[in-house]
């Protein structure tokens, strides 16, 4: 049953990430990876919110490991960071790396605090 929950969440999270990323990328033309940046920060916020409301179990498997695991992406973050360096966009690469990490922690914490107070 756990595999099905993670799998279903993963399917929905992956499709959501693809669609949202495509929509953002088509509307914002820049070398900065705005879509992945935005999606990962939203995912951090949502994971923080989820963790404030659940201690694990089936809901976490479906939404945390499944949906948010597929919705956010560390591998694309690494690829885009490397690509920015390779394309001599060093300033954008550093901004992307640092802001993703720092704002990801802030987003997670903010999501946790918001959900905890509701």
Image (spheres, rainbow, N blue to C red):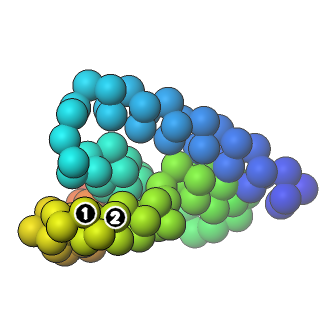
Q: Position of residue 110 (x, y in %)?
A: 24, 60
Q: Residue furthest front?
A: 87
| Residue placed under numbered mark 2 in the picture | 83
- Displayed quadrant of residue 107: bottom left
Question: Which residue is under mark 1?
Answer: 87
23 above or below 104?
above
As drawn, the label of residue 31 is none
Residue 86 visible at all: yes
Q: Is residue 20 left or right of residue 116?
A: right
Graded by Cα atoms within 10 Å as few (under 14), some (14 to 19) or many (20 or more), the crowding at tag 2 reads some
Residue 8 is situated, as x and y percent measured from the top left of the image, at 75, 44
User: Residue at 21% of width from left, 51% of height from top?
Assistant: 32
Between tags 1 and 2, which lies in front? 1
Name the secondary structure under disc 2.
helix
Residue 1 at x, y = what percent?
Answer: 89, 56
Given the current orientation, which residue lies at the most extreme left position?
91
Could you say which is closer to the camera, residue 51 or residue 21? 21
Helix, strand or loop at label 1? It is loop
Using the image as rendered, state which of residue 107 and residue 54 is in the foreground: 107
Vertical position of residue 46 compared to residue 13: above or below: below
At which x and y percent is residue 3? 84, 59
Using the rendered view, name the quadrant where residue 24 is placed: top left
User: How much space separates mark 1 and mark 2, taking CA atoms?
Assistant: 6 Å
Residue located 16% across and 64% down the image: 89
Examine the rendering and report whether any part of residue 47 can be seen. no
| Identity of the residue drawn at 58% across and 69% down | 55
Q: Are marks 1 and 2 in contact (CB under 8 Å)?
A: yes
**Residue at 41% over, 70% down:** 78
């Amino acid at each position: 049953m756990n595999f099905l929950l993670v799998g279903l969440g993963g399917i929905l999270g992956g499709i959501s990430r693809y669609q949202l990323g495509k929509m953002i990328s088509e509307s914002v033309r820049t070398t900065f990876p705005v879509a992945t940046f935005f999606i990962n920060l939203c995912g951090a916020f949502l994971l923080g919110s989820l963790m404030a409301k659940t201690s694990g179990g089936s809901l976490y498997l479906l939404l945390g490991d499944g949906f948010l695991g597929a919705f956010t992406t560390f591998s694309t973050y690494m690829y885009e960071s490397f690509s920015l360096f390779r394309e001599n966009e060093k300033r954008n690469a550093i901004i992307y790396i640092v802001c993703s990490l720092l704002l990801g922690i802030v987003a997670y914490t903010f999501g946790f605090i918001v959900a905890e107070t509701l």
